[in-house]
Image: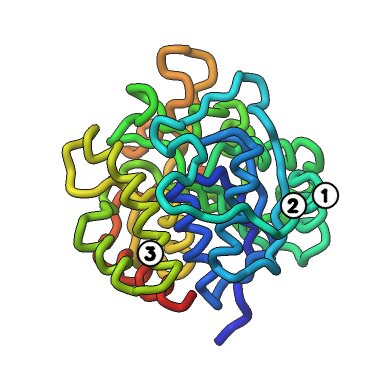
Amino acid sequence: MSEPRKIIIDTDPGQDDAVAILLALASPELEVLGITAVAGNVPLALTEKNARKICELAGRTDVPVFAGAVRPLTRRLVTAEHVHGRTGLDGPDLPEPAMKLQDKYAVDFIVETLMGEPDGAVTLCVLGPLTNIALAMIREPAIVSRIREIVLMGGGYFEQGNVTPSAEFNIYVDPQAAEVVFKSGVPIVMMPLDVTHKALTTNARVAAIRDLGTPVGLATAQLLDFFDRYDEQKYGTDGGPLHDPCVIAYLLKPELFSGRHCNVEIETSSELTMGATVVDWWGVTDRPKNALVMRDIDADGFFTLLTERLARL
């Protein structure tokens, strides 16, 4: 096997973030250098705690967890307890974490890691608002050329939005940060709602995870059971979209996904469409193509991969 790919997971757990972290920690192809928490689905005090809870569930207390931005760059924080519950990880009864939060600020960890690792060695896997990443780029512009790529869950084009009619939550929470990242020139792979709404946690798929019979399998099924209820009611589907694990699955099996290189611009001035990702899917402008925007997923293959990996924990 080749050398594992070095990644930093930037996240605001969230049930689907938790499943993405578990998938990464279960996969020997990936070396998780650290997990950086950001305010998003719930406030920072909960997201950093939730990240540690998931590391402990996976038996991976060796992975350092850092707390980052407590709020967006310029806007007030919008959270999503109505989706994720009061704790952000409602569902299973996970114990308070014993592992310590690192003293270092997440943004400093990101900068120091990128400056210390070889050029192009580190991939950023971004599962929440882009605040920490934008702050790191602003603090030390030299990191931009050193990032291998950014794989992120965010945005929507054909599916539009899930928190406003035109904006997806992660981008909406901090559109100004998203603009910094999308204008940075770093290679970006974008997993929008167009893909994640095709990765549905059906009863059969959740049952297969529960049937693993392990603490991780049971906790994951309980996370998904809670997480599903909101989207099933909203969309009238069997199961809800499993957004964030698509980021990790892409690193493991990119052939599960298909899309095209497009220009993506972020709306930052109109309150009506704030946080919209304007994807030039049809190439009608001459703006530079700055992201590989995914549109389709082999959902059965994705859930097979997820279940097989979770069985290893």
Mark 3 lies on a secondary structure that is helix
Give the spatial CA distance, label 3 vs label 1: 32 Å
Nearer the observer: mark 3 or 1; the answer is 3
The image quadrant of residue 262 is top left
* Residue for badge 3: 218
The image quadrant of residue 229 is top left
* Residue for badge 1: 103
| Nearer the observer, 147 or 87 | 87
Q: Whole-percent x and y of residue 84?
A: 43, 39
Nearer the observer: mark 2 or 3; the answer is 3
| Nearer the observer, 50 or 271 | 50
Discs 1, 2 touching: Cβ within 8 Å? yes
Q: Residue at x 36, y 32 (%)?
A: 284
Image height check: is 208 above or below 82?
below
Number of the label disc, if any, that sits on residue 221: none
Q: Whole-percent x and y of residue 231?
A: 28, 38
Q: Residue at x 31, y 43 (%)?
A: 194
Q: Residue at x 35, y 70 (%)?
A: 307
Image height check: is 25 above or below 17?
below
Residue 221 left/right relative to 125: left
The image quadrant of residue 43 is top right
Residue 247 left/right relative to 180: left
The amino acid beneath tag 3 is Leu
Q: Earlier in the sequence, mark 3 or mark 1?
A: 1
Residue 51 left/right relative to 81: right
In this rendering, does residue 75 appear at all?
A: yes
Number of the label disc, if any, that sits on residue 101: 2
Q: Quadrant of the N terminus?
A: bottom right
In this rendering, does residue 187 appear at all?
A: no
Q: Residue at x 35, y 31 (%)?
A: 162
Give the spatial CA distance, label 2 vs label 3: 26 Å
